[in-house]
Amino acid sequence: MNPIFETKLEMIEAKEQWFIPFMNFVDDFRYHKDINAISKPLELSNEKFDALLASTIEYLCNELHINTPDWVWAVPACKDPWFVSGVESIKAFAIVESPVYFRRRKIFVLENFLYRV
């Protein structure tokens, strides 16, 4: 199975615990830089996670100087804005700091969302 599908399924099934498999995907993609891991389109099934993964792939492709797969552009924005942190007091910061890759799909994260130590 495509690693991105595995990550997406884990995220959806875990609901509250989606962040760990999500960041595992981010780490693995940064390490391996394997375009084959993202070459096939997602099966759209969850608007928030579909948009989050498409935005993340777009971000990572830009970061790693890899061409973004064409299917990513077809993933729609969320119907309602999603503030990923869920913390009311930082929504304004997320609006300002969220990278364009996320904002265009109505996903709002802090600037350091994909940063790792």
Image (spheres, rainbow, N blue to C red):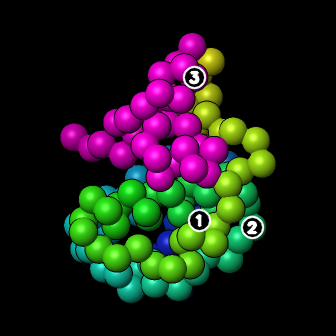
Magenta range is: 89-117
Mark 1 and mark 3: Cα distance apart in space: 25 Å
Q: Which mark's residue is nearer the viewer, 1 or 3?
A: 3
Image spot of residue 24 (x, y percent): 39, 58
Asked if disc 1 and disc 3 are in contact, CB closer than 8 Å, the reply is no
State which tag comes first along the sequence, 2 or 1. Answer: 1
Which residue occupies 71% across, 50% down? 78
All told, the count of numbered labels is: 3
For label 2, the crowd category at 10 Å Cα-Cα, with few meaning under 14, some 14 to 19 and many 20 or more, is: few
Asked if disc 2 and disc 1 are in contact, CB closer than 8 Å, the reply is yes
The residue wearing badge 3 is: 91
**Rendering quarter of residue 68:** bottom left
Image spot of residue 85 (x, y percent): 55, 31
**Rendering quarter of residue 42:** bottom right
Mark 2 and mark 1: Cα distance apart in space: 10 Å
Which residue is nearer to you in this view: 116 or 13?
Answer: 116
The residue wearing badge 1 is: 8
Which residue is nearer to you in this view: 27 or 104?
Answer: 104
Whether residue 28 is visible, yes or no, is: no
Which residue occupies 46% across, 84% down? 39
Image spot of residue 19 (x, y percent): 50, 47
Relative placement, left or right, of 109 versus 68 is right
Mark 3 and mark 2: Cα distance apart in space: 26 Å
Q: Note whether 80 is above or below 57 in the view shown.
A: above
